[in-house]
Image (cartoon, grey):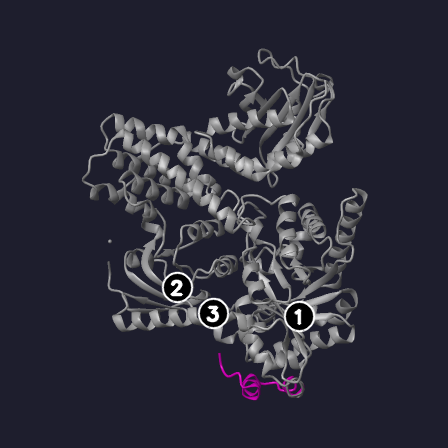
Amino acid sequence: MVRNKDNVDLICDIAELAGLFERSSSLNNFMDTATRIIAWHMKAAVCSIYLFDESSQELVLQATQGLDPSAVGQVRLKLGEGITGTALKELRPICEGRGSKNPSFKHIPGIQEERYEAFLAVPILRNLERIGVLVAQDPEPNYFDDNDIKALRAISGQLATTIENAKLLMSVHELTRAQQPPGPSNLPRFIRGIQASEGIAIGTAASLSTIDDDVLRTFDQDPTPRTLDDFHRAMKETEEQLSTLQRELEERLSDVASLIFSAHLLILKDDSFSGTIVELIEKGTPPQKAVSMVMHNYIRLFSNSKNPRLQEKVLDLKDLGHRLLLNLMSHNPDLANYEGQIIVTRELLPSDLLKLAAQKVAGLILLSGNITSHVAILSRSLNIPAIMIDDPQLGDMLDGRSLIVDALQGTLFIEPDPDVRSKYDALLEERNRLAQLEPAVLPETQTRDGVRITLSANINLLSDMQTACRLKAEGIGLYRSEFPFIVRDNFPSEEEQYRIYRRIMEGMEGRAVTLRTLDIGGDKTLPYLTTGPEANPFLGLRAIRFSLRNRAVFSQQLRAMLRAGTGYPLRILFPLVSSVDDFTNARDVVHACMKELEDEQIPYQRETQLGAMIELPSAVELIEELARECDFVSIGTNDLIQYLLAVDRTNEMISDLYLPYHPAVLRALYRVAKAAQKHGIDASVCGDVASDPAMLPFLLGCGIRRLSVDSRNIPRLQNAIAELDLAEATRKAEQAILIGRVSEVAEFLGVGPR
């Protein structure tokens, strides 16, 4: 009998899987429901989920649809045992028309498995870490085909993060519970920090380091008696709020917001978590105190765990406890978000930042010795003003105080007086007024003497495209593709990446789009990737080096980009190219991906242009050879200046030595621009120097005709370019590169000390 199976796209739809989780009442219920729905979609008699126990190196049957329910928790397979264990050991799907004929088949008496012939086992992986196995079985021999393998692989990929979180939570249940062991100083009115994300925030400080203490204190401040029914109501309200936040965030930031609140919901639905609270309440503990006690115990267990994945969930726990107690005490649910609050924290993951953005945080103060670029860049894309202050002890002292964060200057005002507050209120009004002048931006940019200059946008998230289009960007000069990688708990699949890149291509409506391949390393790390410690990660396995060492990840990204570019002008940019070999090796991978897509009859952009990012001194030295091989080059001035001058621009002690107008920097820029002109290829500048009006005459004067900047800088740059005489700028650039002293260059260009 032929059974019509559902379309693979429907099975792989992340919205369905997210919705499935939201409808579940507990971890076990989630997995039971998942097996039932997957079996129904695939028209398979059996679907089972096995989870891998690292301590015993065994697979444990955790949920099943079709096998004997009593087998759950009882069936255990060693790694490599049976078809299921073999699939996980070898990290590959195994599909058998008659499973019993496979030499690895293991008969398990009593679970009623013998009547099912067709057998399909797909490992559930987070990167290369073993999470478990998803198994489908059916009595009809040869029932599963290649489409079923693809479907089950897609499902396992979508469920991997949630299932892994479930595993982590289960591991907490095995830890021994213990009691959690149980003050302001004079503050300056003004502190200077370092700008991380431009803007102004006015609000009240909320220290993430003290949120758990707030949870402990809150029940003492609530004299109203609460009941078990109140607790159940609070649980329901909290779940509804979190589900709503997730949906709203998905709508705003679909490329990076996948299941951001899944850990919150998993903990909330954990029977051990809620059951312990209920037990305490039934024994006479006030509900507020019961919630606080259990929450503190979880915070302690997670904080002290040697598992870094559990440690990362501490902020989720604090946020969940805060929200649950506010709902329990019938506070306005809106108080459970961070509207009007300036978060003060020692560290912040990109996923944490997305959660705070969803909860309407006003601003950020990061208390650490340096700020990671991905948090800074993400803050800018989310329009969250942020500064960094190197004082880890400041958080508790600021908590609850009135603040003004001036992330234009990198300064913090504590308990500002009325005059200061009035000044910043007026400044905010002025910035809002200037935003209304956006319609004056022209669709094309020209110098005073009529030379066309292309102004493109740097974007980090899909939401950045709205600003880019509104401000008439002439394309995307740099899409930083790492953000969908950084904020997830595992590598995004080819299909997930394709959907993101395709939306960018479609959104720009035929204007050129430059997609930069994965640029991780240095201060941009993937929390789920363990490559081992590096003495100097900025000089380590990063950017194109990582991609060439991880061919599977690289190929998936390139295939997604090539597919997304179909019918549109696509440019792919390789970061941190240090040699001609780097570029040609990366180009070979592109050509191999093109051949794969051709063989699979999948449409792709055959005319894709390939470029190198010039941000290393070695690339400048080899620019003639690179220009002969590349279709275009893009100068990343942020890293180029750092590597040329050996200056970390985030190091406040030497930030005055980070000089875009240093003679070595000017000569490198000039040399790259002239080599590109000689070989007839485009050279663009996409670093911060591109949006510096003081450097603009030199850039255009040495031959640069393309600039890629934060979209919000386009109106200001367009006006500056319109006043610039290119002939005069060219003469001045040719003179500037002959000057060897920093002070003389500064005087000649009129840029002055920074």
Mark 3–mark 2 distance (CA, rounded to whole Å)? 33 Å
Dot 2: element: loop
* Position of residue 263 in the picture relative to residue 481 (left or right): left
Q: Which amino acid type is marked by label 3?
A: Gln
Q: Residues within 10 Å of mark 3 (few under 14, many from 20)?
A: few
* Position of residue 20 in the picture relative to residue 546 (left or right): left
The label nearer to you, 1 versus 2, is: 1
Q: Indicate whether residue 131 is drawn in magenta.
A: no
Tell which circle, 3 or 1, labels the residue nearer the N-terminal end: 3
Q: Which amino acid type is marked by label 2?
A: Ile
Of the 4 image quadrants, the one containing the N terminus is: top right
Q: How far across and down, in percent of the image, does residue 432 sit?
A: 42, 68
The tag on residue 436 is 3
Say which of 539 and 227 sits in front.
227
Q: How far across and down, in percent of the image, does residue 725 sit?
A: 63, 86
Tell which circle, 3 or 2, labels the residue nearer the N-terminal end: 2
Look at the image and give the residue range highlighted in magenta. 732-754
Quarter holding residue 539: bottom right
Q: How far across and down, in percent of the image, does residue 388 sit?
A: 42, 63
Quarter holding residue 155: top right
**Callout 3 touching callout 1 (CB < 8 Å):** no
- The residue carrying mark 2 is 389
Say which of 628 and 404 sits in front.
404
Tell which circle, 1 or 2, labels the residue nearer the N-terminal end: 2
The tag on residue 684 is 1
Q: How far across and down, in percent of the image, does residue 609 sit?
A: 74, 61
